[in-house]
Amino acid sequence: MLCALFAAAGQALAQDGFVTIPETVREVVDGVTGVPVKVTVPTFRMGEAEVTPAEFEAVMGFNPSHTKASAHPVENVTWWDAIGYANLRRVREGLAPLYDLTTSLANPSSDGYRLPTDGEWQAAAGEPAKGAQSNLGSANTKDTQVLLEESRRGGTKAVRSYAPNARGLYDMTGNVCEWCYDFFDPVANAVHRAANPQGPAAGLNRIMRGGSFLSTSSSWGRGYRSSMPPGHKSRFTGFRLARNAPAASASTVSAANWYAPYPQLPAAFAAATGTLTSLVPFRRGAVMDKWSRVRGSPRGPAPPPHARLISTHREPTYTGRLMLLQVEADYWEKIYVMTPPGEHQRPLPVVIVPYYDVDTPAGINLGGRNYLPPGVRSFALLAVQQGCMAIAVRWFGESYGEGYAEAVANLAMRHPDSTGLGKWVWGARRLLDWMETQPEMDRARIGMIGHSRGRQDDALCHGDGLAHRRRGCVRARH
């Protein structure tokens, strides 16, 4: 009953398609300092629904969506497309644009159409909707085929297909992920500003909120907060607009044996291997050939070894280079190359550290999705402190889509015969090919330290990259 009253009030305020969200104050524990901070989000106005293809095409002159239906949310748009739409819509109404499209900075005093900040989106959304209340995917987190079937048969639904939330806003969970204005900070609850927060001053990725029609409805949804580079686009991401509120409308509102079952042989395999093929007749090369086929890899020729520099970081114990490595003809993966200080008379041994993102292995916040301060997982930092070069490389699941489900779906649609492991190995091989071109790296002394039983070490000793014939095969696993 209370939700219905709130929704009715919100709808009453949405005469122009925008709902007024009153000032909110919430206390969070700053993820950097551990200090409780009261964060205030001033009154603002939020789009009642996601922008549709019809609305986008009327302003921009084209429809980029995978699903062309005019009443569905627009998708397949970059962050730049979203702020471009906001600017041009304002110009068509005879007003000055809000965003500088060269710097992406916004005029804070303008009442132009804009993207909501992360703090505003949170204030407007409240608790995520679940189950039949939103257009989310299933709770499946294991079966790729189920995920692919969902991506084929599922899709967006017309905006306003579900009941609004307590604020009178539709589809704040599911349908499409929604671009926000802020740069992404991987530190949970990092407070950059207590009043009207707008995230860090710089970064590589922009925040997305709300999850898509493919996002898991399990606890792995993690609040449906993610990020992507602003130039990326996907059938899973769209946006809604926000506006500043008129000033007059502002308000104040038995433990020892826990492991015993794990080494036990399953009953079905006690006397036979079931349908598994015996390895006895196979030569080693034939086993590796079969394993390569099972593992799968992206198809097509490998791109030439190439990486481009994003930024350089001079730290007390190393110099770091944040770079993008070309792993496909039109796709780049993030790496962080760390070199010990001083002059080096001969090439240095190299430790490769694959991880969710490059920040945690290096122990430095580089704006990725996954960061922990320096500690026992800072494998790259520990290696460079021992005189080795170290290269942290990002997992494709943190870069190939809005979330893990979307990344896997994008991989399956782009490379139907590849597995996640095959994609990992492909990316590691491209890294090794590039390392072959770097004279400061010792090609005979290359090690790789894995995580969560990852098998990127396949790429070291069984790769098809340019450097394979002269590589050392040093492996470790966390």
Image (cartoon, rainbow, N blue to C red):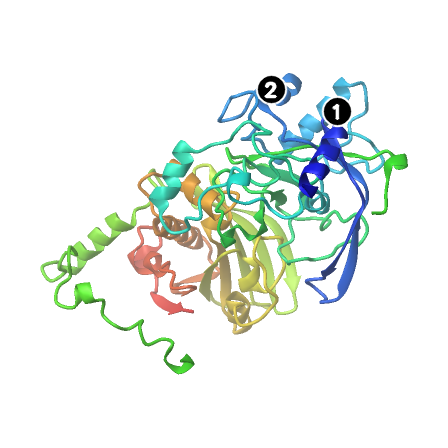
Residue that carries the numbered disc 1 in the rendered image: 16
Disc 1, SS: loop
The answer to whether any part of residue 74 appears in the image is: yes
Work out whether 448 lies above or below 151. Answer: below
Closer to the N terminus: mark 1 or mark 2?
A: 1
Q: Amino acid at mark 2?
A: Ala
Where's residue 56, x and y in %?
A: 62, 23
The dot on residue 54 is 2
Work out whether 337 lies above or below 110. Answer: below
The answer to whether any part of residue 412 appears in the image is: no
Quarter-of-image position of residue 7: top right
- Number of numbered discs: 2
Where's residue 330, x and y in %?
A: 46, 37
Judge from the rendering whether residue 97 lies leftward or rightward of residue 329; answer left or right. Answer: right
Where's residue 25, x and y in %?
A: 79, 52
Disc 2, SS: helix
Q: What residue is at 68 percent from the left and 57 percent from the top?
A: 189
Q: Nearer the viewer, residue 410 or 386?
A: 410
Q: Quadrant of the N terminus?
A: top right
Q: What residue is at 51 percent from the left and 40 percent from the top?
A: 132
Judge from the rendering whether residue 418 lies leftward or rightward of residue 291; answer left or right. Answer: right
Q: What residue is at 47 percent from the left and 55 percent from the top?
A: 438
Q: Answer few, some or many: residues within 10 Å of disc 1's Cα (few below 14, many 20 plus, some between 14 and 19).
A: few
CA gap, disc 1 and disc 2: 16 Å
